[in-house]
Amino acid sequence: MRTQLTLLAALLLAPSALTLCLGAGPTIANGGMDGAPVDHSEGKGFLVTPPSWTPVNVDTARSDRLSVEVSDRAGAGQCLRVKALGSDAGVYQSLAPLEQGKTYLVSAWVKRLSGTLAVEAYPFAWGPAVKRRLDSVSTGWTHLTVGLTPVDGGAHLYLVAAPEAEFLIDEVEIHPATVQVSLPKPLPYDFGSRQSYRLTVTPVATESALPASVLVQPISDTEPDRVLAPPQPVKLTGTTAVEVTVPVRAEGSFCVQVTNPQTGAVLSGSPVVPLVGDPWIVRSPFKDSLFASLDYKWPMRVTVLTASRQAMAGLEATAEILDGAGKTVRQTHGALSGSSLAVPVDGRGLAAGSYHLRLTVRTAAGRLTHQSDRALRILPPAPNEVVCAPNGDTLVNGRRFFPVGLYWVLADPMGWKPGPGRKTDDLHELHAAGFNTLHTYAFEHNDANDTDDNAVAYLDMAQEFGFKVMMGLRRDWYQGQELNAAAIEQRVRRLRSHPALLCWTLWDEPDSNVSNVSRVQAVYDLVNRLDPYHPAMPVFMSGGGRPFREAADLNLFDCYPGAGNAGLLPGVFERAQGALPDKPMWYVAQAYQQGDKLPSGEDMRLYWQHALDAGAKAIFWYGYGGDARGWDSIRITPEHFATVKRVVRELADEGSAR
């Protein structure tokens, strides 16, 4: 198991209580980790947090440790010791305001005692890393620096240690970089082996040419020092345009780092850039299947990222349906439609069963530029079929349905089963407010309420009160050491024909760790095989879904910007769509209290308006809070509940009309 210390700067999606001095530039409160001396003898002082910092994920029962102690670094005062034997543990601090688009340098003195050290920066809360620098070999005090370019008005700064890592931390600082780097933007693709990007590098002030070296570095745990292109030497006398190239099918994301070629010191770093990866975006048949409710047809659309319309006009596309023996049983040809190739797929008249769909794209001269083969199912008609149409709309038995959902509705089965404990008035109230889809963690948490019978009763309740259900799966069935395929199969077979079932949600925010990809894929493959008639997908954190694209029928993601920060969402939606451009977008919006602030009616109205403007095909709200009325509940106050109901009613009317 890899162990690491991590310095995370996750960009702020909520207001911060920390005020920075703008005149002198931003500062980090108590970056020197000063605090009162503590007696560490006999197991004491295992959770001592320096002022201005907040502990995160520290579990003293397993001997995790936070302690302020005298530093052994020459000339230093005190430092913070972080020791973790479990999941990420340490401290964090919120920074605001920071200037959007301006590059800062975040640095810290770190002494690695065990494990692997890392410096990480995140462009928005809980999304993919802007930068990750790992060090598993250094000894003594090391000065680590990372470039941070906010995409909004602040940052969350985390100092944490992953399992079994131990380190000392001191003098955490942030200051404006002397060199500013723009966001690298892709240039038109020429169907070659590399993709080009252009950016600008600008020294803040210099009287003579400043030597610099431009490096393209992937965001990678496994290969932190790998570069995607050779270093480029540049002389900076003003704003300098730089072009970099990366392999065309490279996955993940990268950032551009500018260093002093003589000293190696970091001068600046660009914002994170999702790699184009495979530039070919093919909107294949939904769930790789042809459905009776769609008349066994699908208008496949082929788009090439950054390719011009003129370049696309010179391509010829063919789609073939092949039977099990590899024989072509249906062939169609594409035509240019806008800036994409439209290639019809027609399975009418073919027997239900398993096939393959082959897409071939050539230039007018006959050169092969793209070929893909995917499994294809032609499915017999089925009751309660839920599919997504080519335009992304959800169809339930062939009729359009716009999900307006609510997370975490009811925890105790008494609340949904017939009887005196049933929350009848509450359920009628939610339906009248415009909610038409429910979710509950009761069938994801690992407790006695999570039974097949209770799940059926929940679906029965939903059907009775006019709701659909986004159904989860018990987490220890797929997050334990072994995949409990038998339990998952039993649950899916029991529920798959129920008329209230809308879809399956497979995993909550798996993109927090890309090592989850294979396990999520296994769960998806199992559910998809057992129930091809309902969408199945994880719920992602903003734009983190790309590594999981084969395990998601829809791009379901959450982003909670906080009160007053709805303006962040257009950029979030753009990144999320860029991660899964061929998937319909479903958004989970914030209706709960974050910190000490509730989103206003205007905040929540902007959340759903931005989502609809970005093309969202469903909007869920977090959350009802189970049976409680705490910080995560829309019922935290009667006034807030009334505001939520009013805003959701407006959304329901607007969503059904679009």
Image (cartoon, rainbow, N blue to C red):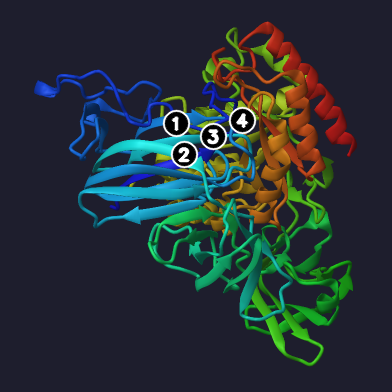
Residue with the mark numbered 1: 28
Disc 1 vs disc 2: Cβ atoms closer than 8 Å? yes
Which x, y percent locates residue 53?
39, 25
Which x, y percent locates residue 1?
28, 52
Given residues 441 and 278, the one toward you in this image is 278
Mark 2 / mark 3, whichever is N-terminal: 3
Labels in figure, total: 4
Q: Residue at x 41, y 27 (%)?
A: 447
> Are there few (<14), some (14-19), or many (20+) residues within 10 Å of tag 2?
many
Residue with the mark numbered 4: 439
Residue with the mark numbered 2: 174
Disc 3 vs disc 4: Cβ atoms closer than 8 Å? no
Q: Amino acid at mark 4?
A: His
Separation of marks 1 and 4 at Cα, in angstroms:
40 Å
Reply above or below: 45 against 100. Answer: above
Separation of marks 2 and 3 at Cα, in angstroms:
9 Å
Given residues 275 and 454, the one toward you in this image is 275
Residue with the mark numbered 3: 25
